[in-house]
Image (cartoon, helix red, strand yellow):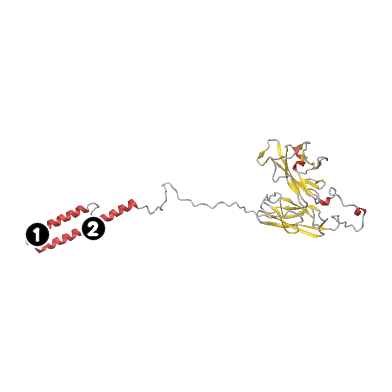
Amino acid sequence: MHCVPGQAAGLALIGWWTIDTERRELQSGVDEAGEGSTRHTGWLIAALGVFVLVCVAITFLAFQALTRDRHEPDATIPWGTMMSVTDSPPVPSQPPTSTLTDCQPDAHFLDDVTIPDGTVLGADTPFLKVWRVQNSGTCPWDETYQLRFVSGDPMGGALSASVPAAEPGEVAELSLSLSAPSQPGDYRGDWQLCASGTTCFGPHLFIDISVSNGTDPTPNTDPTPTSSSTQPAPSPESSPSLLPPNAGASEWLVSGSRAIGVREISWDTSLNGFELAKGEIYLSLYIVGLPIGTNSTIFSPLEIAVVDGDGEVHETLILERKDPPFALCTAAQGGACEGWWTTQVPDRNKTRRSLTLRWEPSLLLAPLETSIWQ
C-alpha cells in the first residue's frame, strides 16, 4: 500500500466518512451486530489512523526534498565560484625561471707587464702598473667587473678600476695609474678582481717597489763610478722609467707633463643605436692619458685624430662613441684619464691596415704621431 503526495487530504476525508457511516450503522444495529462487530470496527479504525499518519509523513518528507533542491546551493561547487562547463581546472602557477647563471669566475696571473717586483723608483714618481691575467673561469668579464684595492699601500691609486672585457680563456691586461710614496722605503699594495657586489676571486695582484733616497729612480748598480752618474736627472720626455715600455697598442706620446697612448683597438658597424652605411666602419681606440709630475693636467678628445692608410685625417665623433668614452678629463698625480675615443673611416683594407695616432697638445707646436698596432 502506498500513497502519493497530494492525495493525503482525500484519503483523510474518505476515512472520516467511512468511520462516520459505520458509527451510525453500529448505533442503529447494535443489538444485531453484537460484541464481534464492535471489535472488528475498532481494528479498522486503528488501521485507517496508521495509514493516514504514514501518508502525512511521506508528504512532509517529499515537500522538504523539493524545497531543498530548489533553494540550497550545490554542495560540490564552492560558494562564490563561477564556472562554465567548458572551464578547465586551474593550472598551478610555475615559479619564475631563474636568471642566474651557473658560471664560476676565476683568474690566473701570467706576468708583470710593467714594474716587476722590487723595482726601485724615486719619491713621488708616477707610473703605470700593468698585470697580464687570463680569465680562467667560466664567466665573461664585463663592465660590472672591477679591480679593487684590498690591502697594503694604495700608492695614490684608485680604490677600484674597470677592467677590459674578456671571455673565458682570453688574456687581458689590467692597469692602474699609481705614484711612488714620498718617503723612502719598501712598499706593497694588493688588488683583486671582483664581480658585481662583493664577490672577489682569483689571486691577489700586487705591486712591490722600493723608494730610493736620491732623485734617480733606478740606482746605479755598477760599483765603478762613471761620468754619467754626475749628469742631471733625465727629463720626463726621455726617461723610460716613468712610463711602461708602451701603452699596449702604441708607443707613448709625451708632451711636457702629459703622456697618451692607445691600449686597445676596436672595429664596430653600429654604436649606441647609430648604424653606418655600407663601406664605412667605426674605429674606436682605448686612450690612456697620464700626468707626469706633481701638477694636475687636462686631456681633451678634441686633441686626438687618426690618419688612415690613405693619408686621410679623421677627427673625434661626438654622438657615436663607444662606452665608456674618453671625455674631457683632469688627472691629478697618480691618476689617469682613459676611455674609448671613436671616429669613422672607410671600410677598405688599405685604409684599415696602416693607422697613425695624431696628438696635438699645443696649437703652436707640430702634432705628435705614433703608429697603432693591430
Picture mark count = 2
- The residue tagged 2 is 54
Label 2, residues with CA under 10 Å away: few <14, some 14-19, many ≥20: some
- Give percent across and percent down for residue 21: 12, 56
**In the foreground, 221 or 156:** 156
Residue type marked 1: Gln
Residue 27 numbered tag: 1
Disc 2 is placed on an element classified as helix
Quadrant that contains the N terminus: bottom left
Q: For the residue marked with disc 2, what is the amino acid?
A: Val
Image position, residue 149 (x, y; %): 72, 56
Contact (Cβ within 8 Å) of mark 2 with mark 1: no
Residue 40 sits above or below residue 305 on the image: below
Furthest toward the front, the residue is 295
Q: What residue is drawn where x is 12% and y is 62%? A: 38
- Numbered label attached to residue 371: none
**Which corner quadrant of the image does residue 286 belong to?**
top right
Of the two numbered discs 2 and 1 on the same chain, state the one appearing first in sequence. Answer: 1
Q: In this view, does 94 lie to the left or right of 280?
A: left
Indicate the secondary structure of the residue bearing disc 1. Answer: helix
Nearer the observer, 251 or 258? 258
In this orientation, does residue 41 appear?
yes
- Give the CA separation, mark 2 to mark 1: 30 Å
Decide which of 157, 272 is in the foreground and name it.
157
Comparing labels 2 and 1, the label whose residue is closer to the camera? 1
Crowd rating for badge 1 (residues with CA inside 10 Å; few <14, some 14–19, many 20+): few
Residue 257 percent coordinates (x, y):
81, 48
The quadrant of the rendering that contains the C terminus is: top right
Report if residue 264 is visible in the image: no
* The image quarter in which residue 255 lies: top right
In the figure, is residue 369 to the left or right of 75? right
